[in-house]
């Protein structure tokens, strides 16, 4: 669920994986691991993603379908 939501939000904003990785200060492969759900972000990164997309962490984690 988390990876799907990340991919959907990134495509909606028309942002590349490389741009997101740079924003987060991680490698592109590190970001790709989030979308493929091979790895999970730490809390700091999760909050940065929620802030970037303007959604709640619960939405990113699939605990809620409400974005705000």
Image: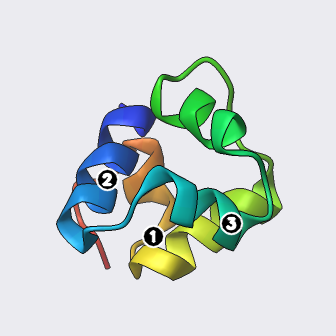
Q: CA distance from mark 1 to mark 3?
A: 21 Å
| N-terminal label among 2 and 1 | 1
Please tell me whether mark 2 or mark 3 is closer to you in this view.
3
Residue 68 image-quadrant placement: bottom left
Instruction: Using the rendered view, name the quadrant where residue 24 is placed.
Output: bottom right
Q: Are marks 1 and 3 in contact (CB under 8 Å)?
A: no
- Measuring from the top left, give residue 44's x and y in whole percent: 80, 64
**Residue 50: percent from the left, percent from the top?**
52, 70
Q: What is the x, y in percent for residue 45?
A: 73, 60
- State which mark lies toward you, 1 or 3: 3
Q: Residue at x 47, y 44 (%)?
A: 61
Dot 1 corresponds to which residue? 56
Do the numbered discs 2 and 3 sit on residues whose CB atoms are within 8 Å?
no
Comparing marks 2 and 1, which lies closer to the viewer? Answer: 1
Dot 1 or dot 3: first in sequence order is: 3
Which quarter of the image is occupied by the N terminus? Answer: top left
Residue 28 is drawn in which quadrant?
Answer: top right
Q: Secondary structure at mark 1?
A: loop
Label 2 with label 1: CB-CB less than 8 Å:
yes
What is the CA distance from the residue labelled 2 to the residue labelled 3? 27 Å
Mark on residue 64? 2
- Identify which residue is drawn at 45% across, 70% down: 56
Q: Which residue is mark 3?
A: 22
Q: Residue at x 71, y 37 (%)?
A: 30
Q: Is residue 52 left or right of residue 27?
A: left
**Considering the numbered disc 2 on the image, is that residue within a helix, a strand or a loop?**
loop
């Amino acid at each position: 669920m988390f990876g799907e939501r990340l991919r959907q939000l990134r495509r909606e904003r028309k942002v590349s994986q490389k741009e997101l990785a740079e924003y987060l200060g991680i490698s592109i492969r590190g970001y790709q691991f989030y979308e493929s759900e091979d790895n999970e972000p730490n809390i700091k990164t999760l909050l940065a993603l929620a802030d970037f997309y303007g959604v709640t962490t619960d939405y990113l984690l699939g605990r809620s379908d409400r974005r705000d």
